[in-house]
Image (tube, rainbow, N blue to C red):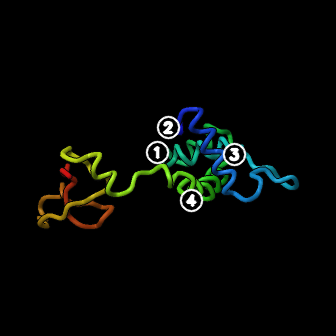
């Protein structure tokens, strides 16, 4: 569900645990509904796919706010924990040189034709098209 194999997930959980600075499950008070491993799985899966928090809550039998809190807390920690593993701008460009690349979420501006609503993006509130670009 997270897109990682068991070994990769174990390594990521260990790195996130170090970055937390405090235990995930507190000794006193109310316990969290998700273990740290489950919470990291949810945060990675949420970033990887377009599954809503309500569905994640149903899968792990916890409330939607518990899922939201886990994602909010762990997303920046996962980014920090994986920073050394991600390629830089030059490495990424070199790895796709000469290939067609789809830039997700990129909207290429185009002429605003009022009668044609196919080019209007509600998300960006303007007209444009998504295209494949070559690096």
Alpha carbon distance from label 1 to label 2: 7 Å
Drawn side of residue 15 relative to residue 123, left or right: right
State how far apart marks 3 and 2 are (Cα): 16 Å
Using residue 8 as the reference point, say whether residue 130 is left or right of it.
Answer: left
Above or below 60: residue 115? below
Residue 28's tag is none
Nearer the N terminus, badge 4 or badge 3? Answer: 3
Give the residue at mark 4. Answer: 76
Task: Give the vertical position of 61 relative to 69 (above or below).
Answer: above
Residue that label 1 marks: 48
Give the numbered dot on residue 36: 3
Residue neighbourhood size for the residue with mark 2, other residues' Cα within 10 Å, grouped as few (<14), some (14–19), many (≥20): few
Give the secondary structure at mark 4: helix
- Give the quadrant of residue 127: bottom left
Contact between labelled residues 4 and 2, with CB atoms less than 8 Å apart? no
Q: What residue is shown at x 33% (from left), y 51% (from top)? A: 92
- How far is disc 2 from disc 4 in space, using C-alphas? 18 Å
Q: Could you classify mark 1 by the number of other residues whose Cα lies within 10 Å: few (under 14), some (14-19), or many (20 or more)?
A: few
Q: Mark 1 to mark 4: distance in Å?
A: 15 Å
The alpha-carbon separation of the residues under discs 3 and 1 comes to 18 Å
User: Which sits earlier in the primary sequence, circle 1 or circle 2?
Assistant: 2
The answer to whether marks 1 and 2 mark residues whose Cβ atoms lie closer than 8 Å is yes
């Amino acid at each position: 569900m997270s897109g990682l194999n068991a070994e990769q997930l174990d390594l990521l959980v260990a790195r996130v645990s170090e970055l937390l600075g405090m235990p995930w499950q507190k000794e006193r008070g109310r316990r969290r509904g998700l273990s740290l491993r489950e919470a990291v799985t949810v945060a990675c899966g949420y970033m990887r796919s377009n599954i809503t928090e309500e569905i994640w809550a149903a899968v792990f039998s916890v409330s939607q706010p518990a899922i939201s809190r886990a994602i909010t807390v762990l997303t920046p920690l996962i980014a920090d924990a994986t920073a050394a593993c991600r390629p830089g701008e030059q490495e990424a460009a070199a790895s796709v040189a000469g290939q067609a690349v789809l830039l997700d979420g990129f909207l290429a501006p185009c002429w605003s034709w009022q009668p044609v609503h196919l080019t209007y993006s509600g998300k960006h509130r303007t007209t444009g098209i998504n295209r494949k670009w070559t690096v």
